[in-house]
Image (cartoon, rainbow, N blue to C red):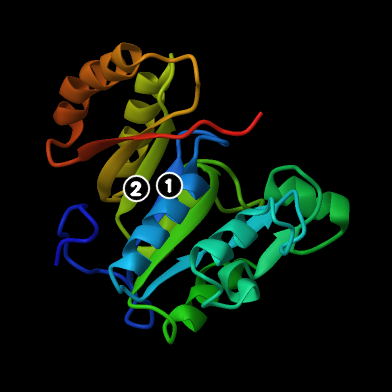
Amino acid sequence: MTWHGFRDLPRLSHPSLPEGRFVCGTDTDVGKTHFICETLQSLRIQGKRIGAYKPIASGYPRDDSRSDAARLHAALGGSIPIERINPQAILPPYAPPIAAEIADERIDEALLFRGAFSLFEYCDWLLVEGAGGLLSPITWSLTNADLAKQFNYPLILVAANRLGCVHQVLSTVQVALDMGLTVDSVIMNCVSANQSEVEQQNNIRLLEPFLMRLDPTISIRQIRFIPPR
């Protein structure tokens, strides 16, 4: 089954999980949540039973409208309880291990993965959003890549379409492939109101031949999102 325009890949995930994708970024603030929300809304319109999971987040209370959890919850029309979308939220605005240390809280490593099992009753498709880049630490012993391997979902990589992104995309894809992960797609997200269409296309044109060397089946999609000032 073609999954919202992405590749039709064999299902290798845990039987207690819906089919899905693991969405990570080349960096923080590259538009992962925006991309996921747009996808959720589109699939809901198509009548799909779609869900979202943010294993851990930091920086805002879970129900703050600025939090990733609140945005995902809204994109789903409130169909899934917000505490199931994001079971672990830490207030300090730092990387999760540092935030937990400051807040004197403990991150439940088992819950990062197993928390998604509770979503099986709500959806047939699941988008899991990592925290930051593929190798960003989410605990003192785990990175997003480690968690992605537990889910065994194909990756969707979101990159900010700006100077330097070609290196970021290629290095992230190389690491993912070296770790035995499947990369479904690369999403090139415009994050600057001043960037011309030509500049955006130049990055994509430069990326394409080198991405082909790593895996010719990985697709590239372009989206435009101007973050609020």
Image quadrant of residue 107? bottom right
Give whichever of 129, 70 is nearer the camera. 70
* Position in image of residue 66 (x %, y %): 69, 50
At 20% from the left and 22% from the top, the residue drawn is: 210
* Position in image of residue 32 (x %, y %): 48, 45
At 24% from the left and 15% from the top, the residue drawn is: 206
Q: Which label number is shown at residue 19? A: none
The answer to whether residue 132 is left or right of residue 99 is left
Q: Is residue 202 above or below residue 137?
A: above
SS class, disc 2: strand
Question: Is residue 107 shown to the viewer in this render?
Answer: no
Judged from this view, the residue extending furthest toward the front is 45
Q: Residues within 10 Å of mark 1 (few under 14, many from 20)?
A: some
At 40% from the left and 61% from the top, the residue drawn is: 40
The answer to whether residue 201 is left or right of residue 228 is left
SS class, disc 1: helix
At 52% from the left and 70% from the top, the residue drawn is: 77
- Contact, CB < 8 Å: mark 1 with mark 2? yes
Residue behind mark 1: 35
Q: Residues within 10 Å of mark 2 (few under 14, many from 20)?
A: many
* Position in image of residue 202 (x %, y %): 27, 13
Residue behind mark 2: 156
* Position in image of residue 164 (x %, y %): 43, 16
Image quadrant of residue 195? top left
Residue type, numbered disc 2: Ile
Q: Quadrant of the C terminus?
A: top right
Whichever of labels 1 and 2 marks the residue nearer the N terminus, that label is 1
Q: Is residue 68 above or below residue 125?
A: above
Q: Quadrant of the N terminus?
A: bottom left
Residue type, numbered disc 1: Phe
Q: Is residue 174 above or below residue 23?
A: above
- How far separated are the C-alphas under marks 1 and 2? 10 Å
